[in-house]
Amino acid sequence: MKNIRPHILWTSKIILSILFLLASLGKLTQNQAVIEMFSDWGYFDGFYLIIGVLELSFAILLLIPKTSIFATIALFVIMVGALITHLIHDPLGQIFRPLIFMALLSVVMFLQWRKG
């Protein structure tokens, strides 16, 4: 199990980085549907850009060993915010995406802290 742990950790980090990159694209390209969603949720204009920049930045930092734990925690906090937003404003079916992200981030957190 000790030999497979680094592979699971890196595979999880790469998958998460790709998923957060994709999640940030709609925000950073100012997709009209994304802008309308954030507006409907009551967030100020441009908040979607802040979230997009944070998602992209932390997705990159997730792949750098010295910043990976910080990025994992920061992304988890962003997903808590997304989960709360979806719980308040959307049908329950919308909570699955943040929950999946949070589950994958939890795996990465566990494996990083158990590395030693």
Image (cartoon, grey):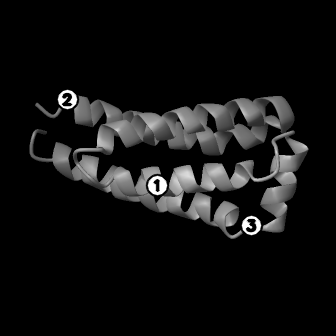
Crowd rating for badge 2 (residues with CA inside 10 Å; few <14, some 14–19, many 20+): few
Q: Residue at x 49, y 41 (%)?
A: 75
Q: Amino acid at mark 2?
A: Arg
Residue 57 - label: 1
SS of the residue under disc 1: helix
Residue 34, quarter of the rendered image? bottom right
In the rendered structure, the answer to whether residue 84 lies left or right of residue 74 reads right
Q: Earlier in the sequence, mark 1 or mark 3?
A: 3
Q: Quick one: quadrant of the N terminus? A: top left
SS of the residue under disc 2: loop
Q: Earlier in the sequence, mark 2 or mark 3?
A: 3
Foreground tag (2 vs 3): 3
Crowd rating for badge 1 (residues with CA inside 10 Å; few <14, some 14–19, many 20+): some
SS of the residue under disc 3: loop
In the rendered structure, the answer to whether residue 4 lies left or right of residue 49 reads left
Q: Quick one: quadrant of the C terminus? A: top left
CA gap, disc 2 to disc 3?
39 Å
Residue matched to label 3: 30
How far across and how far down the image is residue 74, in percent? 47, 37
CA gap, disc 1 to disc 2?
25 Å
Choose between 103 and 59: the one closer to the eye: 59
Q: Residue at x 83, y 66 (%)?
A: 32
Residue matched to label 2: 114
Residue 104 - label: none
How far across and how far down the image is residue 83, in percent? 67, 34
How far across and how far down the image is residue 18, in percent? 46, 62
In the rendered structure, the answer to whether residue 105 lies left or right of residue 45 reads left
In the rendered structure, the answer to whether residue 43 lies left or right of residue 29 reads right
Q: Amino acid at mark 3?
A: Gln
How far across and how far down the image is residue 41, in percent? 85, 41
Q: Earlier in the sequence, mark 1 or mark 2?
A: 1
